[in-house]
Image (tube, helix red, strand yellow):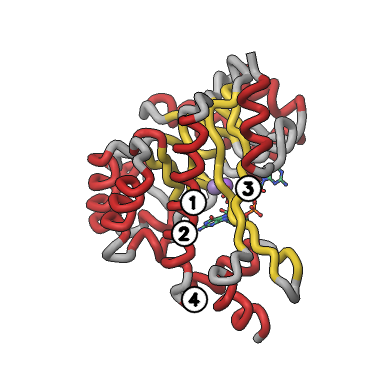
């Protein structure tokens, strides 16, 4: 199939790029971070959605090499922003369960941090609930990442299976409330979002609301003192230089 064939050459042909979506502190309205999102512009197919090609990278195992490329690219970018004096607390990178479970993952991360000379505390990795299904093996990896100084967040939170006891035991920093629950806020469905915010705060997580598109959603999240948010209401994912401009323009 053409997607598979083209994906094999995508790294070498430099068809991948990374966009950044700002993450906003809901009190100060300042950009405090950004999520890196992979894009693929293929010579034959044009832009292909990550929802389509990431599963293929995972099935073929190519997600390991592409994932390494993403991490290296993002760390290099963050370092160069810092050298220009731009202040951003964190840069977040999605890590596939396949990459997370690879036995060389932590070693690769260490090498990338060394090579790019980025302080680990600026890097946050996003994993999903399915990644932590096996508590014991994911615990070890998370502890190793934490000992490097990195942050770890649970992405799409609320859509998968994760027991409350897992949440209490894992040294996780951040919960990202899945967009589907933020969508519900427009229809007066606050119950899940409200529950996640309260529980998350009691467990001392930072809470990020994903996919904020309306003022109504934002007002509710602010009233509940949700810490941070991202979504089209603030900005869609943008080119790296546009993130730079945003950081330079904020007071
Ligand atoms: O960027 P977009 O919202 O279209 O992303 C769609 C899906 O692809 C999301 O689930 C997102 O987590 C995933 N995705 C985007 N970029 C990356 C990436 O760099 N690595 C991994 N593993 N998943 C990504
Ligand atoms: O699964 P994950 O949370 O990593 O996916 C993030 C995806 O959500 C990205 O592909 C990004 O483009 C998309 N996204 C971010 N903000 C919004 C939003 O406000 N509305 C919609 N529809 N998608 C969003
Ligand atoms: Mn994400
Ligand atoms: Na998400």
Q: Which mark is residue 19?
A: 3
Q: Which residue is mark 1?
A: 73
Task: Read off the residue under disc 4.
Answer: 59
The residue at 46%/59% (across/down) is 69
Q: Is residue 64 left or right of residue 33?
A: left
Q: Nearer the viewer, mark 4 or mark 2?
A: 2
* Residue, disc 2: 69
Residue 199 in the image, given as x and y percentages of width and height: 44, 30
Give the Cα separation between the discs numbered 3 and 1.
11 Å
Residue 113 x %, y % = 34, 46
The alpha-carbon separation of the residues under discs 1 and 4 comes to 23 Å
Q: Are marks 3 and 4 in contact (CB under 8 Å)?
A: no
Contact? badges 2 and 1 (CB < 8 Å): yes
Q: Does 68 appear above or below 11?
A: above
Q: Earlier in the sequence, mark 1 or mark 4?
A: 4
| In this rendering, the label closer to the viewer, 3 or 1 | 1
Whether tag 3 and tag 2 are in contact, CB under 8 A, the answer is no
Relative vertical location of residue 81 with respect to residue 152 in this rendering, above or below? above
The answer to whether residue 45 is above or below residue 131 is below
| Residue situated in front as seen by the camera: 171 or 16 | 16
Instruction: For mark 1, give the secondary structure.
Output: helix
Q: Is mark 3 within 8 Å of ligand 1?
A: yes
**Which is more toward the observer, 91 or 43?**
43
Q: Say whether residue 184 is visible.
A: no
In space, the residues marked 2 and 1 are separated at their CA atoms by 6 Å
Mark 2 Cβ and ligand 1 under 8 Å apart: no
């Amino acid at each position: 199939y053409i997607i598979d064939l083209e994906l094999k050459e995508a790294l070498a042909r430099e068809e991948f790029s990374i966009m950044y979506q700002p993450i906003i502190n809901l009190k100060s309205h300042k950009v405090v971070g950004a999520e890196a999102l992979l894009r693929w512009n293929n010579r034959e197919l044009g832009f292909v959605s990550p929802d389509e090609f990431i599963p293929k990278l995972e099935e073929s195992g190519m997600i390991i090499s592409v994932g390494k490329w993403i991490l290296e690219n993002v760390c290099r970018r963050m370092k160069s922003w810092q050298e220009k004096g731009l202040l951003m607390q964190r840069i977040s990178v999605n890590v596939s369960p396949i990459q997370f479970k690879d036995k060389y993952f932590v070693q690769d991360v260490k090498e990338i941090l060394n090579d790019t000379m980025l302080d680990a505390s600026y890097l946050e990795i996003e994993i999903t609930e399915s990644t932590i299904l096996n508590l014991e093996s994911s615990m070890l990896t998370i502890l190793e990442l934490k000992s490097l100084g990195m942050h770890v967040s649970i992405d799409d939170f609320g859509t998968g299976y994760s027991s409350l006891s897992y949440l209490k035991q894992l040294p996780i920093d951040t919960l990202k409330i899945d967009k589907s629950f933020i969508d519900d806020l427009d229809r007066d469905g606050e119950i899940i979002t409200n529950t996640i915010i309260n529980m998350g705060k009691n467990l001392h997580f930072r809470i990020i609301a994903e996919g904020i598109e309306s003022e109504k959603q934002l007002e509710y999240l602010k009233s509940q003192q949700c810490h941070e948010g991202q979504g089209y209401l603030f900005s869609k994912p943008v080119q790296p230089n546009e993130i730079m401009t945003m950081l330079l323009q904020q007071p």
